[in-house]
Amino acid sequence: MTELADATAEERSTQINPFSDSRVLVTGGLGFIGSNLAMKLVELGARVTIVDSGNPKGGANDYNIVPIRDRITLIDADIGNCDNLSGIVNESQFIFDLAAQVSHLESMASPRLDLEMNCAAHLELLEAIRKSAANPKLVYTGSRVQYGRITRLPVREDHPIDPVDNNGISKHAYEQYCLLYHRTYGVRASSLRITNTYGPRNVMRHARQGFVNWFVRLAIDSQPIEIFGDGTQKREYSYVDDVVDACLRCATIDNTNGNAYNVGGFPSSVLDVAKTLTELKPGTKIIFRPFPEERKPIEIGDYYSDYTRLSESTGWKPTTPLKEGLRRTIEFYETSKKHYW
Amino acid sequence: MTELADATAEERSTQINPFSDSRVLVTGGLGFIGSNLAMKLVELGARVTIVDSGNPKGGANDYNIVPIRDRITLIDADIGNCDNLSGIVNESQFIFDLAAQVSHLESMASPRLDLEMNCAAHLELLEAIRKSAANPKLVYTGSRVQYGRITRLPVREDHPIDPVDNNGISKHAYEQYCLLYHRTYGVRASSLRITNTYGPRNVMRHARQGFVNWFVRLAIDSQPIEIFGDGTQKREYSYVDDVVDACLRCATIDNTNGNAYNVGGFPSSVLDVAKTLTELKPGTKIIFRPFPEERKPIEIGDYYSDYTRLSESTGWKPTTPLKEGLRRTIEFYETSKKHYW
């Protein structure tokens, strides 16, 4: 699959590329990870259908898919209310279910909407897959927020599930449905629990969808980077291409069916992210602020995961170190700032 | 609280009865456990409001509350769509959230509806409680189905959560919301994970809401009791009065806030239940049948729980042995058969 991730035209025409001429559905394909995934799939020769409600709050941005716009089918719909969903599912060999409400704070403000967007609506898709004779492979992107309070590090997949926000509950419930549908009906479903993902095509208008991207914006704008607390809390960071690679590997390897996997990254402190940005954008200032009250309940302290299970099943490992990922991220936004700011 | 469970008029007038003159909301109060609880609360002098959508599929039966009909307020509404819910919540000191879709098979047939009924709708109540200055105590009735596949017996509350049906996922998700709202907002919420409950006021028209009650009906009707498999799988059985007692204790003891508890019962095999019925209703026949295909995926094998946590926190233990509970159950339905058959 490393070959796949760097596939050339010649490779795409051979048997080693299972996506060549395949039909693929990507939900949330106008969003951050979804659009990066869709672009890679098109590059690999897949015929991609995107279902996306176009909600900018969820990260949808038409500009994200400009490079592939004339080579994909775009359906403007919520996955919970999509005409002919069963027809689309029946034609698909691979389904990547990435549509989500990803803001922790919004999940607390509107819990029922969060549950609808992250779980109830997706049951329409899961039911369509269950009923489909084609039995397409489903890759769902779960999240580290499912774990919530961390009691041991690094976090393995059997760590207790104890969410500290509504987002974690709704994401986990849908993962449980996916894995249950595998056991009960043979649906070929896997879940990837992703962590702080950053890179091109993310939401840059506010800080609520990943602080790494927000720090990048501040650095590009020559604004000071504000750190809550002392910044020593450890997190791990995944460059979006590494997450896309995990999705592709998981999709093509059937021993992943019925399992949930951590998609790990490179652990380092929040302060280290800021410092790396000061190296890449000299002159960037760092300011320390007290932790805002409303964020305290969802602050989980250190987090980094053990991704051995995914490595053993698929050979995946993260390949883009933080500094290189941040360099590429800055480069992307500096040339396309007007579409994201 | 043993005193409470057997309260006399004199005791109700003293300080030891926290329900005396208290305002109490019971969701699902027309149903099996809800109506038994409401009757006990009225007996203890509480002013009870029942919110119930009256869905017979959920177990609602007007006859269940005939003895207390003129002493309670009945609101015909779904908890997810109830006028003036915040007003009702603001006036309540105790809230028992029992409304549920409890059929495993129906949860598989209509997963989105099951999620709506067991989780999404209840978020309206939880949000109303969060916003209420009165900070009422919330007791939610979870279920053993949350555990799903059993890996060690007896099942303690820290057993892995691995549901084998949609019902287990939706029930567990709402429990997670309840406990999260305790940690995040200080909502005084507890969850009681109840097991096979039987007794007066249950649904008797089909076998989908508890096989013990169904066996009772067959025995009363002089029909043979059909057992799937050899009947040696072990379950535990809770007489409804014991479950009501657990609810009342949990409501009045604040160290239960933020916790989930097993409400255990008396373990014995499915076959033993049938045999006990043949003793109570001589002439009852037992027939063995192969396990139906559609039930195999949700058959979890042996189940019995460790209820030490609840005993230590509240002093609760089950007090009605199986034979005595079955005797009372038979007695109830033999005199009120026409309202349940």
Image (tube, coloured by chain):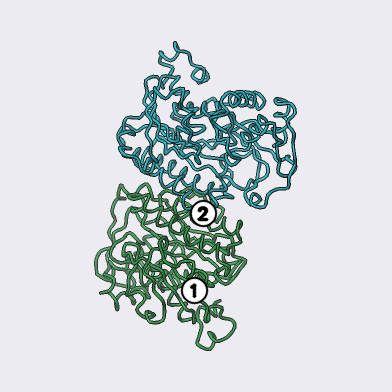
Chain colours: A cyan, B green
In-front residue for pair B323/A289: A289
Which residue position holds label 2? B153
**Dot in front, 2 or 1:** 1
Q: Residue at x 55, y 71 (%)?
A: B249
Q: Who is closer to the viewer here, A30 or A152? A: A30
Residue A294: mark: none
- Residue A220 in percent (x, y) is at 66, 29
CA gap between label 2 and label 1 equals 36 Å
- Residue A284's place in the image compared with B336, above or below, is above
**Residue B145 percent across, percent down from the top left:** 44, 55
Image check: B309 left or right of A35? right
The amino acid pointed to by label 2 is Leu
Query: Quick check: B101 left or right of B134?
Result: left
- Label 2: few (<14), some (14–19) or many (≥20) C-alpha neighbours in 10 Å: few
Quadrant of res A177: top left
Answer with mark 2 or mark 1, whichever residue precedes in sequence. Answer: 1
Q: Which residue is mark 1?
A: B24
Figure check: A155 above or below A315 = below
Query: Looking at the image, is B68 positioned above or below residue A104?
Result: below
Front position in the image: A262 or B51: B51
Q: At numbered mark 2, what does the secondary structure look like: helix, strand or loop?
A: loop
Q: Residue at x 34, y 71 (%)?
A: B279
Q: Quadrant of residue A303?
A: top right
Q: As displayed, is residue A10 above or below residue A333? A: above
Q: Tell me the amino acid under the disc marked 1.
A: Val
Query: In the rendered image, which quarter is residue A20 located in?
Result: top left
* For the residues bearing labels 2 and 1, Cβ distance under 8 angstroms: no
Asked whether A41 or A63 is in front, the reply is A63
Give the residue furthest to the top: A10
